[in-house]
Amino acid sequence: MSLKRVGILTGGGDCPGLNAVIRGVTRSAIIGHEAEVIGIEQGFEGLIFDRHRKLTIAETKDILPLGGTILGTTNKGDPFQYRQFDKDGQLTTQDYSQRTIENLKRLDLDCLFVVGGDGTLRLGYKFFEMGFPVIGIPKTIDNDLAGTDYTFGYQTAVQVACDALDRLQTTGESHQRVMILEVMGRDAGWIALESGVSGGAHVILIPEIPYDLEKVLEKIRLRKEGGSPFSVIVVAEGAKEIGKDVITSATASTRLQGVAQLGGVGGYIAQQLSDRIDLEVRCTVLGHVQRGGTPLSFDRILGTRLGTQAVEAAAQGNLGTMVALRSQEIILIPLKSLAGITRKVPEDSQLVRTAESIGLCLGR
Ligand code: F6P
């Protein structure tokens, strides 16, 4: 299939490596196929409001080390239920799908590359089912997408969290304190687990293994009795205590997104521990620091490979698919197969067992 005109959008939360994908798609479509490349701005919002621009090799020059996405993104741009506040401050939901379809038809793309996490990919599949040529490219720092071994952005986020743990170790040891680091990941514990193992945390709490506070206290006490009166805990934002719910908050911006914001479990545990031990406890919430900034080379390479392979898949007519990393190779899987599946840490996975075999506490 000859590619005359392709489009690309980045949707959902940003992550390091998005610009490598945009560059990979743009360069390979132009160099390999002499195609025109259209960059849709702010995810699906750009399709609703017809905001896009032509991408050239010159425009994607020097963007590899850049964090974020040169196209912009949003996680509240669903054309089927677009949320906004009206002039009285009331939340309204509008169906903009018809105008999105008209804008898409006018763009006349041979393929739209949809770069995003589960929500964005689900939207991409919806448009594919309506007859538009779509290929998905998986993205998220959470590494929780089904079908791919890794998502780009994840390794950078883990490294940021690992660096933070290294720093918390030294100040924690100097002051003989319990230092808690809350990291992102939504309902998956990948960032907490891998940063915890690589950053030498003594306790790792992940959503997949509800924690028993007594086990955490026991670990801290044993360390103190053994001559180490400090401990470092990494906790995933989606972690929860046995029998309790995950901690969320609902702000105006989360009402716009339609999903609750996770976070606060680090502070909750700090309070629980402070009431039970005679050590000072401090909590750091790493937040969006994990999403910003320059990508590691791993994420640049993965982004470049996924972007270029997506263009090849389009040229071969393999639409309605997602490019994925499987055992070092980029493969294609049906976009359909991803629906509603979150890839979580198996609670008996080798890395969980490795962590426990070297004496780390996983709260059980
Ligand atoms: O999915 C990526 C992620 O960073 C999650 O780890 C986190 O819960 C969420 O996005 C935060 O979203 P927002 O940017 O809307 O605060």
Image (tube, rainbow, N blue to C red):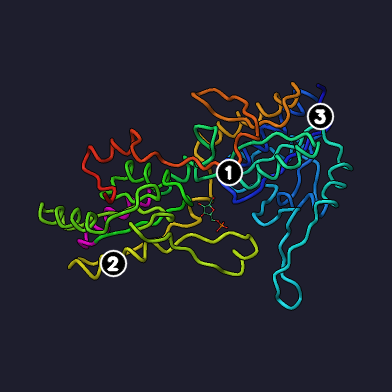
Identify the residue at horizontal 71%, vertical 53% (top origin).
Answer: 78
The mark closer to the camera, 2 or 3, is 2
Q: Nearer the viewer, residue 153 or 139?
A: 139
Q: CA distance from mark 2 to mark 3?
A: 59 Å
Helix, strand or loop under label 2: helix
Identify the residue at horizontal 34%, vertical 52% (top origin).
Answer: 210
Q: Does the magenta portion include 323?
A: no
Mark 1 lies on residue:
340
Identify the residue at horizontal 78%, vertical 34% (top origin).
Answer: 133
Mark 2 lies on residue:
272
Q: Which residues are magenta?
A: 163-177
In this rendering, the answer to whether 132 lies above or below 239 is: above
Identity of the amino acid at label 3?
Ala
Identify the residue at horizontal 43%, vertical 54% (top origin).
Answer: 238
In this rendering, the answer to whether 338 lies above or below 240 is: above
- Lower position in the chain sequence, tag 3 or tag 1: 3
